[in-house]
Image (cartoon, coloured by chain):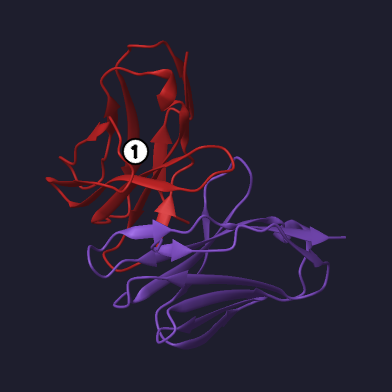
Chain colours: A red, B purple
Amino acid sequence: EADIYQTPRYLVIGTGKKITLECSQTMGHDKMYWYQQDPGMELHLIHYSYGVNSTEKGDLSSESTVSRIRTEHFPLTLESARPSHTSQYLCASSEYYGEAFFGQGTRLTVV
Amino acid sequence: QKEVEQNSGPLSVPEGAIASLNCTYSDRGSQSFFWYRQYSGKSPELIMSIYSNGDKEDGRFTAQLNKASQYVSLLIRDSQPSDSATYLCAVLMNRDDKIIFGKGTRLHILP
């Protein structure tokens, strides 16, 4: 069983607030990913990392930022939340050429 | 051309029959391919990985890969109502080592 954890599971927050979504994995995986998924829609890659101090933007433009200071930790930050940021955010990790394992996701609602 | 393409469905299959799900990809040099199952409101769950041309079987699931045709498929034998879900094809892209998902195929198993 994959050990990757996301907190919080659900978050309702007001417009303009700064938020950080946490993602941690205990498998020692080099690669980590953030995907965004609206209900019933496809997964969009918004950020990924090959390892410590490596971060790249994904295919979907996002106003969020990420950091990778430790192998096990890949937080995502929104400096000023807007209703358009309402979505589910899924974190995943993988070995370099292997399959990705997902956390349980954070469902974000910005009011 | 999208990087990973799937028919969005819905695909309706009678209980006990074989469900066949298909996927094509654009990056010819890709070497790693994955099938995930996603229930509504849940995170994607890995079902199969395949890396070599041919078939790979695991219980009721068989993944098939044809790199020359850039085609991956998933067969589900003896379909059960619990197999009703969205099935996501994912490809580890050779050019930049990121995992990209198709839009997913919604599968309905009819009792």
Please say if B40 is above or below B71: above
Q: Which of B51 and A110 is in front in this view?
A: A110
Identify the residue shown where x is 43% and y is 64%.
B4
Q: Which of A73 and A85 is in front in this view?
A: A85
Give how far across and how far down residue A12 sits, in percent: 48, 17
- At mark 1, the secondary structure is strand
Quarter of the image where the N terminus of chain B is located: bottom left
Most extreme residue toward the front is B1
Give how far across and how far down residue A107 sits, in percent: 49, 30
Give how far across and how far down residue B23 sits, in percent: 52, 70
Identify the residue shown where x is 19% and y is 37%.
A67
Relative placement, left or right, of B2 versus A55 is right
According to the image, label 1 marks what residue?
Answer: A23
Give how far across and how far down residue B88 sits, in percent: 53, 59
Please say if A8 is above or below A51: above
Total tally of numbered discs in the picture: 1
Relative placement, left or right, of B42 versus A85 is right
Identify the residue shown where x is 41% and y is 36%.
A6
Residue A81, image quadrant:
top left
